[in-house]
Amino acid sequence: MNSHRTTGAASAVALTLLIALAGTGTAHSAPRPAGPAYVALGDSYSSGVGAGSYQGGDCKRSSKAYPALWAAAHAPASFAFTACSGARTGDVLGKQLAPLTASTGLVSVSIGGNDAGFSDTMTTCVFNDDRTCLDRIDKASAFIRGQLPAKLDAVYDAIDSKAPHARVVVLGYPRFYKPAATDCAGLSETKRTAINKAADLLDSVIAGRAKGHGFAYGDVNTTFKGHELCSGSPWLRSVAFPVDESYHPTAGGQSGGYLPVLTSAARRATAR
């Protein structure tokens, strides 16, 4: 055989192998595709009040809040974290929606508790007798049934309009207290039962309006069960200092209670 042909054939084989190996290396080193552009809206349960590690500013956005944890785990194409402590539905409409666009792929939101007077209700129940507490809860419940649905609709309509193709996950609120706890200091069983009942009512209204808009609803009671106050392993703060962190999820509540629910609901939600 001609030596030039032998050398040429060997070179061709070597070049082919080199190209194949290079191609294989390129495939293995390809970066993970970016997740959907993600916008996190809502109140203190979304901003992460109670979890610590705040980013600064009055909104108390925490790096340990479930939106930040989800973004760190899924590397979205972009992440806008506009949830803010104390927010009501009007604040979401007026201050939080700017990052939403037609290219937004995922939206999460928790809202409605402050509209219903969450903070005032808990303060009333902590510092007053059973009757005064129950009266304040009755007032909050009447608002939840009568006025809150329209306020939620306004927020959900705006999200749908500004991010028409996004998967939207609406997160609820956990029950605060382990039912029928026998060794629970502080509030009476009468108060605790009434507070839990009001939380269930709030969640049912939020879930119903979310479903009406075609959004996914995330029920965090499934993950917080066994981690309520009086459970011995709470993922919620009781009366705390600073006071605004009272009755909010701890870092464990954000990572163990909220994050799995968002992750699961985001998978189930369909792009619109």
Image: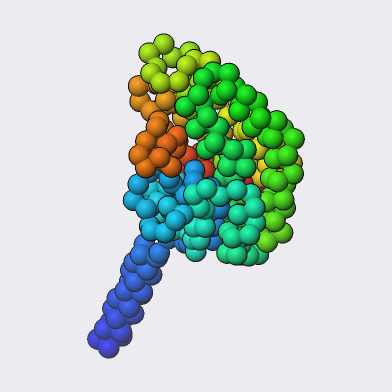
Residue 149 x, y percent position in the rendering: 72, 40
- The total number of labels drawn is 0
Q: Which residue shows up at 34% across the image and 71% down it? A: 22
Q: Nearer the viewer, residue 136 or 91?
A: 136
Task: Look at the image and tell me whether residue 205 can be seen.
Answer: no
Q: Nearer the viewer, residue 30 or 198?
A: 198
The relative height of residue 126 versus residue 87 in the rendered view (above or below) is above
Task: Look at the image and tell me whether residue 184 can be seen.
Answer: yes
Indicate the quadrant containing the N terminus: top left, top right, bottom left or bottom right.
Answer: bottom left
Q: Residue furthest top?
A: 182
Q: Which residue shows up at 41% across the image and 21% down it? A: 186
Q: Is residue 165 left or right of residue 172?
A: right
Q: How is the image coloured?
A: rainbow
Q: Is residue 18 left or right of residue 244?
A: left
Residue 135 x, y percent position in the rendering: 62, 24
Quadrant in the rendering for residue 254: top left
Residue 10 x, y percent position in the rendering: 28, 78
Q: Which residue shows up at 62% across the image and 42% down it? A: 115
The relative height of residue 182 versus residue 167 in the rendered view (above or below) is above
Q: Nearer the viewer, residue 145 or 227?
A: 145
The relative height of residue 164 versus residue 182 in the rendered view (above or below) is below
Residue 271 x, y percent position in the rendering: 65, 53
Q: Which residue shows up at 65% across the image and 38% down it? A: 206
Q: Is residue 161 left or right of residue 84?
A: right
